[in-house]
């Protein structure tokens, strides 16, 4: 099923699978992250030899499984199989594992470890026990695929918000982390450019729906280790406005590279490397300890 409020320019696909979304055309926020590192990194991953077979880390696998457990539990029940407890160093264990893998593939299911399954089950329980988080997750459109054409560059753009509630005009994005405390997560938000994501998703939804669909962008942070702390963070207008500037810069850079077929890496000149404040403070503390050991 597709909705096309701005026919020909933007649309929403509510039936597109996650795999088809990621393998299909369109510039996503993760694409812009590659451009931000350098255009050459985008070329390598999206056009060049790195295009074949993306490497998925254990943390990424756990994050994907947590998304299923928390946001699409009904889908998890039909797409996930739990690996049997077996010693794969033995012949019997290898055979049991091979049989489980064969059965999972035959049923079109993903085989996950019992440990990962137990972890995301505990994370799901923690979210359900958080009064506001569980209330915000009621209703809305989950995992819809939004597509639009950027008017300045002509590039097809896309995003796939975890949840958008059009009536209450907010979006939620689930993030898994080892530390959901405010101070730690603030650093994560800056490092992983969550402000760009908030702006990209908010503007993309507005392009597709024809009105400002997201007034509030909320991150649901869930820890992946016991006691599975849960926190809700709103990215305000300072994050959004900065994110808009950053994604516009990245998108314009990508459009120029696609037009010229030139994909520069880092700076072509010598760049002065200034010492970050935290490093200077660390050296000062070390010197103080040497001068006053007791």
Image: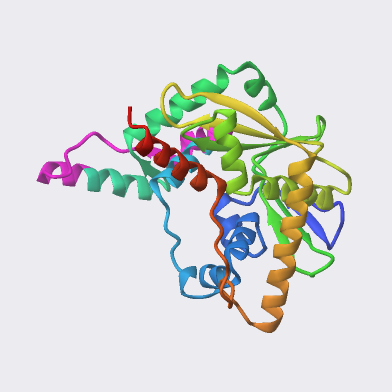
Between residue 248 and residue 186, name the one nearer to us: 186
Q: Is residue 91 visible?
A: yes
Quadrant where the C terminus is found in the figure: top left
Q: Is residue 2 visible?
A: no
Q: Residue at x 73, y 50 (%)?
A: 243
**Residue 95 in magenta?**
yes
Residue 253 image point, x, y percent: 70, 70
Between residue 63 and residue 68, name the one nearer to us: 63
Q: Residue at x 47, y 42 (%)?
A: 284
Q: Residue at x 67, y 44 (%)?
A: 161
**Residue 10 in magenta?**
no
Give the vertical position of 57 relative to 156 (above or below).
above
Where is residue 184, by image quadrant? top right
Q: How many marks?
A: 0
Decide if residue 239 is on the left or right side of residue 262. Answer: right
Where is residue 186, by image quadrant? top right
Q: Residue at x 79, y 48 (%)?
A: 241
Residue 107 image point, x, y percent: 40, 46
The colour scheme applied to this rendered structure is rainbow
Query: The magenta stretch spans which residues?
Result: 68-96
Residue 117 image point, x, y percent: 39, 32
Decide if residue 211 is on the left or right side of residue 153. Answer: right
Decide if residue 47 is on the left or right side of residue 248. Answer: left
Considering every residue shown, the one lying at the far left of the view is: 91
Between residue 81 and residue 64, name the one nearer to us: 64
Considering every residue shown, the one lying at the far front of the view is: 291
Where is residue 149, by image quadrant? bottom right
Give the vertical position of 26 relative to 130 (above or below).
below
């Amino acid at each position: 099923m597709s909705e096309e409020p701005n026919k020909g320019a933007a649309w929403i696909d509510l039936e597109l699978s996650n795999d088809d979304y990621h393998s299909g055309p369109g510039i996503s926020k993760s694409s812009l992250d590659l451009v931000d590192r350098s255009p050459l990194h985008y070329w390598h991953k999206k056009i060049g030899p790195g295009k074949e077979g993306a490497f998925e880390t254990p943390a990424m696998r756990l994050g994907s499984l947590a998304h299923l457990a928390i946001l699409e539990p009904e889908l998890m029940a039909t797409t996930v199989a739990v690996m049997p407890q077996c010693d794969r160093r033995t012949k019997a264990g290898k055979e049991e594992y091979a049989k489980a893998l064969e059965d999972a593939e035959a049923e079109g299911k993903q085989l996950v470890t019992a440990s990962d399954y137990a972890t995301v089950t505990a994370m799901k329980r923690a979210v359900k026990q958080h009064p506001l988080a569980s209330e915000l997750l009621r209703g809305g459109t989950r995992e819809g695929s939004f597509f639009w054409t950027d008017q300045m560059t002509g590039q097809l753009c896309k995003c796939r918000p975890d949840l958008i509630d059009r009536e209450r005009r907010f979006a939620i994005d689930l993030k898994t982390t080892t530390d959901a405390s405010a101070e730690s997560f603030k650093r994560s938000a800056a490092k992983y450019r969550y402000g760009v994501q908030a702006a990209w998703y908010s503007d993309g939804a507005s392009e597709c729906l024809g009105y400002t669909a997201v007034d509030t962008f909320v991150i649901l942070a869930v820890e992946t280790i016991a006691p599975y702390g849960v926190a809700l963070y709103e990215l305000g207008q300072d994050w959004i406005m900065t994110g808009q500037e950053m994604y516009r810069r990245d998108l314009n850079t990508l459009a120029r590279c696609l037009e010229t077929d030139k994909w520069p890496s880092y700076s072509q000149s010598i760049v002065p490397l200034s010492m970050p404040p935290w490093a200077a403070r660390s050296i000062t503390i070390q010197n103080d300890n040497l001068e006053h050991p007791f």
